[in-house]
Amino acid sequence: MRALVLTNFKLRRNLREKLSTFWMKCCYILVLAMPFILLTGLLIKSSLLFGEKSLTELIFSSEWKPMSGKFGFLPFIISSLWVTFISVIIAAPICLLTAIYLTQYARRVVLKIMQPVIDILAGIPSVIYGVWGIIIIVPFVSKIAGWFNVHSSGYSILAGAVVLAVMIIPFILNILIEVYKTIPIELSEASLSLGATKWETIKKVLTRKAFPGIISSFGLGVSRAFGETIAVLMVVGNVVHIPTGIFQAGYPLPALIANNYGEMLSIPMYDSALMLAALILFIVVTIFNMGSRYIIIHYEKKI
Amino acid sequence: MNRQLLRKSEELFYRVLMIISTVIIIIALLAIIISILVKGMPSLSWSMITQTPKGGYYFGKEGGILNAIIGSLYLSGGATLLALAVSLPLALYMNVHKLKQKNVVNSIRFFLDLLWGVPSIVYGAFGFTLMVLLGLRTSLLAGILTVTLFIIPIMVRSMDEVLKTVPKGLLESAFSLGSTRSETAFRVMLRQCIPGIITAILLAFGRAIGDAAAVLFTAGYTDYIPTSLSQPTATLPLSVFFQLSSPIPEVQNRAYASAVVLTVIVLIISIASRGFSMKYQKNKIK
């Protein structure tokens, strides 16, 4: 009897072990397969469009007339590039300086105060950023445009970029703080003992050491900014044209997808075109992500 | 002497810049919260958060956004639970079963980071394709599935960060006492890290409730509180977005009030998760 209970117990334990390991393996496979599933799903949908036109024709044409089957993505791609790069240019120096300040100069208390600030900024939903953009940034941009004698409603590339910059700051900053924290203290001690000032040490020793990490943090910022949808959509103006200045309205790729989902099933090929936009987003973002991650991994090995 | 002065003043210059940029970040956060509160508070009323939209609500008549609040909670709650069923086992698998195979663990981390970087609108578009394929209509279920895919990488990576910190000795002693891998995972690791894991869950919940792009295609929008998984549902971010695009000032003011509700919910989640991670610091076996 006792033996029976024991074997029973063993069997149950074994079964439980097997079952849970099986489920874990399923989850593991799901995650590994996910990027490929995403890719094929979008590819199948958008490939309908390739039957009629070549990819280069689609990407480098600026004619967007869904009703007559003309899908040129150039205005959207150019708008996305404008918004993304301006936002990273705004965010990058702020993040870099703040990261250096928090890790090298500031007292621990300051870092303790800033950590929740960064976390809360990172957690605010993008629609809230959009509302904030409409309340404060858009009128402000309109006023700035006035100083340059440009007439602008404020709903412009610049407004989108400023809102985006604030959104990606916590993201870039967190990585930069990690990067600066992992630099061994001996390095700066050696430099300081040779008579360099603190700033010279930071500029010529630490930042040089952290350079790959800094570049990859900006790369991750680019990929984050490129795919951001609702906040940008709310402030960027959404006019289909190739923008030539920062005070003009733009129409980035994510906004294109989000704005037209309603009518995409009523116009032929429209859904394929929007899926192609999603595919372009996915590929660009993934390339930037992979590049940046690769640099980080490579750099971690060196330390 | 002159050179010395130059060195000093350069450092001073950059230190001032550093402090300015730190202050800019703090001001940005305060500006967001204060501007939302100032714009939204006047139109926030009790009826707004306890009623569903009545007839003519979108022309400024009475009603509230209870449909969106409840809808958002259903959607994020469902997605968080589903994601938990995938994320927790995977995170444990990485840190117990595959502990010795660094390559496997690193490749999972790499894939998760890639997935984390994929914009939510892409998940939305993909979810929509899937819906068409399966013959689903915009519904709570489709929304939950899409958001689940979107938050899995966030949840696994944050759980992984917590589980990574558990000392190896704890695992070794559990194994040496004869426990199986899954017992070690669920009875020792999970118990050791429970506050950190709750933090990860809350983080994912916060992401799910705040995201608009993934549910835009899949969850639809309705004035009613959904009673089954196959009905469409309203969500808070979309309710802010739609009301704001109305030309009527009253409705726009309500959008600001809805934004206050959303911000408050997200802040509460953020503070709660902070509390849990503080607790985690205290109870950890080192």
Image (spheres, coloured by chain):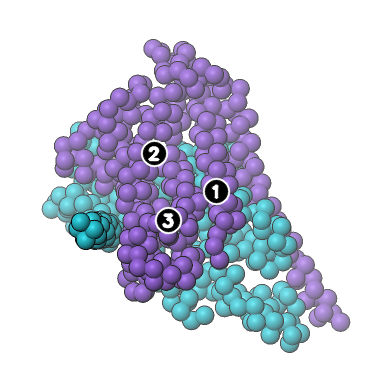
Chain colours: A cyan, B purple
Q: Comparing marks 1 and 2, which lies closer to the viewer? A: 1
The residue sitting at the front extreme is A1
Which numbered disc flags the more N-terminal residue, 3 or 2?
Answer: 2
Residue flagged by tag 1: what amino acid is it?
A: Phe
Mark sitting on residue B76: 2
Q: CA distance from mark 3 to mark 1?
A: 15 Å
The residue sitting at the bottom extreme is A194
Instruction: Check disc 1: other Cα within 10 Å, few if <14, some if 14-19, many if 20+.
Output: some
SS type, badge 1? helix
Residue A167 lies, in percent from the top left, at 52, 49
Camera-side residue: B127 or B279? Answer: B279
Mark sitting on residue B190: 3
Camera-side residue: A275 or A145? Answer: A275
Q: Comparing marks 3 and 1, which lies closer to the viewer? A: 3
Instruction: Check disc 3: other Cα within 10 Å, few if <14, some if 14-19, many if 20+.
Output: some
Instruction: Check disc 2: other Cα within 10 Å, few if <14, some if 14-19, many if 20+.
Output: many
Which numbered disc flags the more N-terminal residue, 3 or 1?
Answer: 3
Judging from the image, mark 2 belongs to the subunit labelled B
Q: Comparing marks 3 and 2, which lies closer to the viewer? A: 3
Residue B216 visible from this viewpoint: yes
Q: Quadrant of the N terminus of chain A?
A: bottom left
Judging from the image, mark 1 belongs to the subunit labelled B
Mark sitting on residue B276: 1
Left or right of residue B104: residue B16: right
Residue B281 lies, in percent from the top left, at 58, 57
Quadrant hosting residue B144: top left
Camera-side residue: A55 or A166? Answer: A166
Residue flagged by tag 2: what amino acid is it?
A: Ser
Q: Residue at 21% of width from left, 52% of height from top?
A: A41
